[in-house]
Image: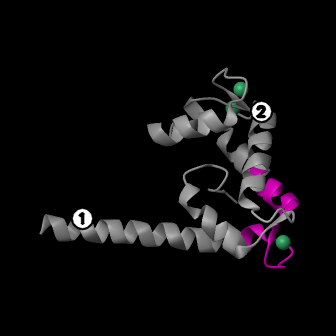
Amino acid sequence: MKKILMAFVIMFFAASVGFAAEEILPKLDKNKDGKISKQEYLGAVSVTFNKLDKNRDGLINRDELGHMDKKDLEAFTKEADTDGNGIISKKEFEQAAVKRFQQLDKNRNGFINKDEWAAGRSELYSPFMRFTF
Ligand SMILES: [Ca+2]
Ligand SMILES: [Ca+2]
Ligand SMILES: [Ca+2]
């Protein structure tokens, strides 16, 4: 019985993650051309930063990331905190986001299309893929 319940929970979780990825692209795509420009991406990144920065000091500290689990937090800090001071400034966040954009833009045309977006879905844990609007 427990096993069946677990299977359901996992299925539900997998389905909701997939659903989220499909839902995010249309929201990012402001001009509705079916792809995400760097400008559209960075606009969403900026909104996400402002939401994470609860005390609005322009920095994201560990407390403000308290909702993330430890593994995600470490991966995110490693990616974004380039000066290693344990705090993520808006500049660090944006620079890491630009790098992320370039990684997702496999054919380097300056846009992330639907396929490229889907390919990056496995990296949903990162705040650069998990937007708040
Ligand atoms: Ca677009
Ligand atoms: Ca802050
Ligand atoms: Ca830093």
Residue 85 seen in render: yes
Q: Residue at x 58, y 63 (%)?
A: 121
User: Is 67 on the left-hand or right-hand side of 28?
Assistant: left
Residue 20 numbered mark, or none: none
| Disc nearer the start of the sequence (2/1) | 1
Furthest residue to the bottom?
A: 33
User: Is 109 on the left-hand or right-hand side of 78?
Assistant: right
Q: Residue at x 47, y 70 (%)?
A: 16
Looking at the rendering, the stretch of residues picked out in magenta corresponds to 26-45
Residue 35 part of the magenta segment? yes
Furthest residue to the front?
A: 107
Q: Quadrant of residue 91?
A: top right
User: Does the numbered disc 2 mark a residue whose Cβ is under 8 Å from ligand 2?
Assistant: yes
Residue beneath label 2, please? 58
Q: How many marks?
A: 2
Q: Amino acid at mark 1?
A: Met
Q: Nearer the viewer, residue 109 or 10?
A: 109
User: Does the numbered disc 1 mark a residue whose Cβ is under 8 Å from ligand 2?
Assistant: no
Q: Quadrant of residue 32?
A: bottom right
Q: Nearer the viewer, mark 2 or mark 1?
A: 1
Q: Amino acid at mark 2?
A: Gly
Which quadrant does the C terminus fall into?
bottom right
- Please provide percent x and percent y for residue 103: 72, 54
Residue beneath label 1, please? 6
Q: Secondary structure at mark 2?
A: loop
| Quadrant of ligand 3 in image | top right
Q: Secondary structure at mark 1?
A: helix
- Please provide percent x and percent y for residue 130: 62, 56
Q: Residue at x 50, y 66 (%)?
A: 17
